Amino acid sequence: MVMVSRTQGQIHSRRAVASENLLIAILAVTAGLAFTDRIGMVFVFSRIQEEFGLNHSDLGLLMAPTAVTWAIASIGLTYLSDWLGGRPKQIIVACVILFSLATGAMGLARNFSDMMWLRAIIGLAAGPVIPLVQSVVARSSSPHRIGRNMGIIIGGVTICSAAIAPALMNGLEAVAGWRITFFAVGLPGVALGGILYILLGSDERDESGETRPMTIRMVSELFSYRNFLVALGGAALAMGNNIAFSSFLPIFLEHQVRLAPVELTTLLVVKGLAATAGTVLAPTLSDRFSRRGCLIVATAFLTLVPVALIFSAQNHLFLIPAIFAMLMSSGTIALMTFIIPGASVPLRLRTTAFGMLVAFGEITGAFLAPPLAGVLADRFGLPAAMWCASALALGAMIAATLYREPPRTDQPAH
């Protein structure tokens, strides 16, 4: 009898793990698609630049409206989710369908102004997706797998936007043009919305007492946690680095390092795969070692990535340390914005905390950094955009040293 019970328990445990893994995989694709629809246009920047007669400052400005609306939606809709008692299903599904349709509509843009408006809509719909997904992950993961699972979500963001997107979009653009490319990239999200509606099940309120309708007074409690305050600055610097670097990397490699189209696509895919591995590596290590220590190491390597690429313009061998630094640094945003702050605040405030961090990071770092990098590139040359990204990473490393090691229990750290 005992043996039968133990066997049934093992079967139930395996099913629970399989169910958790399936959920994490689908949510990783969801987060990846949201960020791909935001950043993917950089892979066809050169063609858009040629058709509309844009300079580097204009390209940087195309990234700005997405950052603003991403921030507004991130904080507004994550707060709404917590106010409703932690029920994100309907919001996630609606957002996925809307940002996918807006991405497809990019192929119909007639001018720079049309693109700016569509970029704003994409940010409005995609902005809350990653914080809401991370909140679902935090609630659904086994305690000893939270860091790994949250890293996998950012890994999904990276592999979709930095590995699959350049190969897919560059290939489609070469065959069918950049307008058809946007139609093709937007289409999968509509189907994914239906899958999520089924997979996330009944979107019922959590009656455990950990989640309840939010008030402004409860949200203000977040500012009593040191790690949350540090994360505000760290998220702004890390996101600014990420968007500025990602925006100008393809055009830097094409015009400064002078890679041929096939070489460029191959390098972007390799870089994306290294970054994907890195987004899982550092968070997984942080489940066993110091989360703060892992973040400091990651941000240190983050400062080296743009520097190595600058030197690669003189010697392509510097591309090798650049890829290695990318591998070691890509866990930065997961640790800086989600894992450490998530472990430092109460569960009932976690979704709102994620939304506020993403919003602040977007409205400051992600909004200001790409136009700044574009202005610097127009004035001093494309390497200046890489130096800008490196300086932001250095600031993120300084912020990482100010964290306190978060607890490994549900008790938040002040």
Image (cartoon, rainbow, N blue to C red):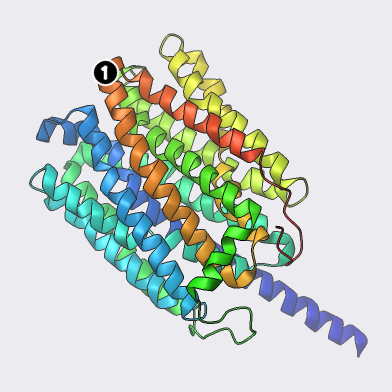
Q: Residue at x 49, y 76 (%)?
A: 215
Q: Quadrant of the N terminus?
A: bottom right
Look at the image and tell me whether residue 183 can be seen: no
Please report the residue visible at 44 percent of the width from the left and 51 percent of the height from the top. Answer: 360
In the image, residue 215 above or below residue 180 = below
Q: Nearer the viewer, residue 175 or 318?
A: 318
Residue for badge 1? 379
Tally of numbered discs: 1
Residue 273: percent from left, percent from top: 51, 39
Q: Is residue 236 above or below residue 407?
A: above
Q: Amino acid at mark 1?
A: Arg
Q: Nearer the viewer, residue 386 or 1?
A: 386
* Image quadrant where one finds the C terminus: bottom right
The image quadrant that residue 267 belongs to is top left
Nearer to us in this view, 229 or 342: 229
In this view, the residue farthest toward the top is: 314
At horizontal 23% and vertical 47% (from top left) the residue drawn is 181
Q: Secondary structure at mark 1?
A: helix
Q: Position of residue 102 (x, y in %)?
A: 23, 59
Left of 401 or right of it: where is 190?
left
Q: Is residue 248 above or below residue 315?
A: below
Residue 256: horizontal and vertical position, in percent? 33, 17
Horizontally, residue 36 falls left or right of residue 5, namely left
- Of all residues, the one furthest to the bottom in this rendering is 1
The answer to whether 297 is drawn above or below residue 133 in the figure is: above
Instruction: Say if residue 45 shows up in the picture.
Output: yes
Q: Residues within 10 Å of mark 1 (few under 14, many from 20)?
A: few
Q: Using residue 179 as the reference point, say whether residue 72 is left or right of it.
A: right
Residue at the far right in the pictured view:
2
